[in-house]
Image (spheres, rainbow, N blue to C red):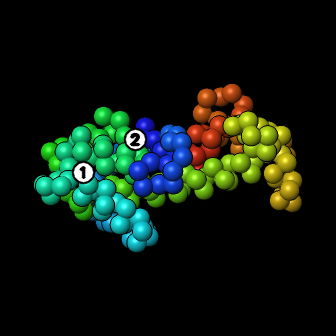
């Protein structure tokens, strides 16, 4: 699992902590990743380019070790397995590919942040779980009239570990399906 570090070389100073971002199942360069690049600000693009050139001074491309270092400088902490998947059986990653990888990861971070804000609207006690009571209160505040049976079915649909509550991971999974 990737980690997004708050702080880092180019981010705001202060302590550096790891926040989960995404599992890398597969990554392919092209149209989808290019659209992620298009959503970046000019400042983000400049940060990514700066990081790339710091870790590729000879302009030959980033090997796995340099890719990891460049990603870490931007606040991401990929595992060796994530790197292997991102390298996509290539010995090096060029500047365009690095831009696509980082754009994709940054956009995933934005999506996760938005999901976390929405999750916290249900999880008023900040327990990290959505309970039947939380869901009941949220539905009532929206003026909806659902039965407890309806609400239980909603929780059961998202509750992968069958503990009767919905964790952030379970919530995220159902929201991005």
Q: Position of residue 166 (x, y in %)?
A: 68, 37
SS for callout 1 = helix
Which residue is at a point 30% across and 43% down the rendered structure image? 68
Q: How many marks?
A: 2
Measured as percent of width and height from the top left, residue 82 is found at 33, 39
Residue 177 horizontal side relative to residue 102, left or right: right
Q: Residue 1 shows which numbered tag? A: none
* Above-or-below relation of 64 to 161: below
Residue 169, image x, y percentages? 58, 39
Q: On screen, 29 above or below 69?
A: below
Instruction: Name the image quarter holding residue 158.
Output: top right
Q: Nearer the viewer, mark 2 or mark 1?
A: 1
The residue labelled by disc 2 is 77
**Disc 2 to disc 1, C-alpha distance:** 15 Å
Which quarter shows the N terminus?
top left
Instruction: Identify residue for label 1.
Output: 55
For the residue pair 100 and 11, the one nearer the viewer reads as 11
């Amino acid at each position: 699992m990737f980690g997004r570090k708050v702080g880092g070389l180019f981010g705001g100073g202060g302590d550096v902590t790891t926040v989960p971002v995404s599992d890398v199942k597969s990554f392919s360069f092209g149209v989808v990743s290019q659209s992620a690049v298009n959503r970046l600000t000019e400042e983000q693009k400049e940060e990514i380019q700066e990081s790339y050139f710091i870790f590729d001074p000879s302009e030959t491309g980033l090997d796995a070790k340099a890719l990891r270092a460049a990603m870490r400088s931007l606040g991401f902490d990929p595992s060796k397995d994530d790197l292997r998947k991102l390298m996509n059986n290539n010995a090096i990653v060029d500047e365009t590919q690095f831009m696509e990888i980082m754009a994709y990861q940054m956009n995933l971070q934005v999506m996760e942040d938005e999901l976390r804000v929405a999750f916290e609207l249900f999880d008023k006690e900040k327990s990290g779980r959505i309970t039947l009571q939380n869901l009941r209160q949220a539905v009532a505040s929206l003026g909806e009239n659902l039965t407890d049976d309806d609400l239980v079915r909603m929780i059961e649909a998202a509750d992968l570990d069958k503990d009767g509550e919905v964790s952030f991971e379970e919530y995220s999974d159902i929201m991005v399906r």
